[in-house]
Image (cartoon, rainbow, N blue to C red):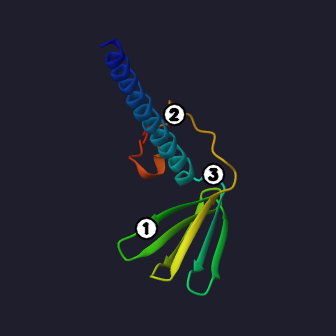
């Protein structure tokens, strides 16, 4: 009987440890993605034709990515301080892309950040 109880306890502990690891990895993954989307991570984007192995585009820098509903990869590139451009890469059956994290991300699973962007919100005016 004691062996069965010990086995059940070991199984419960294993499940808890496994679930905690997944939750931790999910949080770290989310934080890394957020840092990259806030232009804080240097990445390399390589787009290639998978049928011919031809590289169609390479981009290294700080950029954010999004797959839109028109089967396009939207790339928002930070070109200078507070200057951005948006490019599109059409994705089809033969087009694929790879994104590499070049600089690495110093994220903390417990850290969060709130960014207030006054240029997009309400502006307070002062009258004398």
98 lies above or below 118: below
Q: Quadrant of residue 11?
A: top left
Q: Quadrant where the C terminus lies?
A: top left
Mark 2 residue element: loop
- Closer-to-camera residue (19/63): 19
Q: How far apart are the alpha carbons under marks 2 and 1? A: 26 Å
75 lies above or below 90: above
Mark 3 residue element: loop
Residue on which disc 2 sits: 109
Residue furthest out toward the bottom: 52
Q: Residues within 10 Å of mark 2 (few under 14, many from 20)?
A: some
Q: How far apart are the alpha carbons under marks 3 and 1? A: 19 Å
Label 2 close to label 3 by CB (< 8 Å): no
Residue on which disc 3 sits: 41
Q: Nearer the viewer, mark 2 or mark 3?
A: 2
- Closer-to-camera residue (11/87): 11
Q: How far apart are the alpha carbons under marks 2 and 3? A: 17 Å
The x and y percentages for residue 70 are: 37, 77
| Residue at image point 63% right, 40% down | 106
Residue on which disc 1 sits: 67
The x and y percentages for residue 81 are: 65, 56
């Amino acid at each position: 009987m004691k062996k069965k109880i010990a086995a059940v306890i070991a199984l419960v502990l294993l499940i808890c440890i496994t679930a905690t690891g997944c939750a931790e990895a999910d949080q770290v993954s989310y934080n890394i993605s957020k840092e990259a989307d806030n232009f804080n991570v240097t990445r390399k984007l390589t787009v290639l034709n998978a049928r011919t192995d031809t590289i169609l585009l390479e981009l290294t820098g700080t950029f954010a990515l999004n797959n839109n509903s028109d089967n396009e990869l939207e790339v928002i590139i930070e070109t200078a301080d507070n200057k951005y451009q948006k490019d599109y890469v059409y994705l089809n059956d033969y087009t694929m892309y790879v994104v590499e994290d070049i600089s690495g991300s110093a994220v903390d699973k417990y850290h969060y950040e709130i960014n207030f962007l006054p240029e997009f919100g309400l502006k307070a005016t002062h009258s004398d």
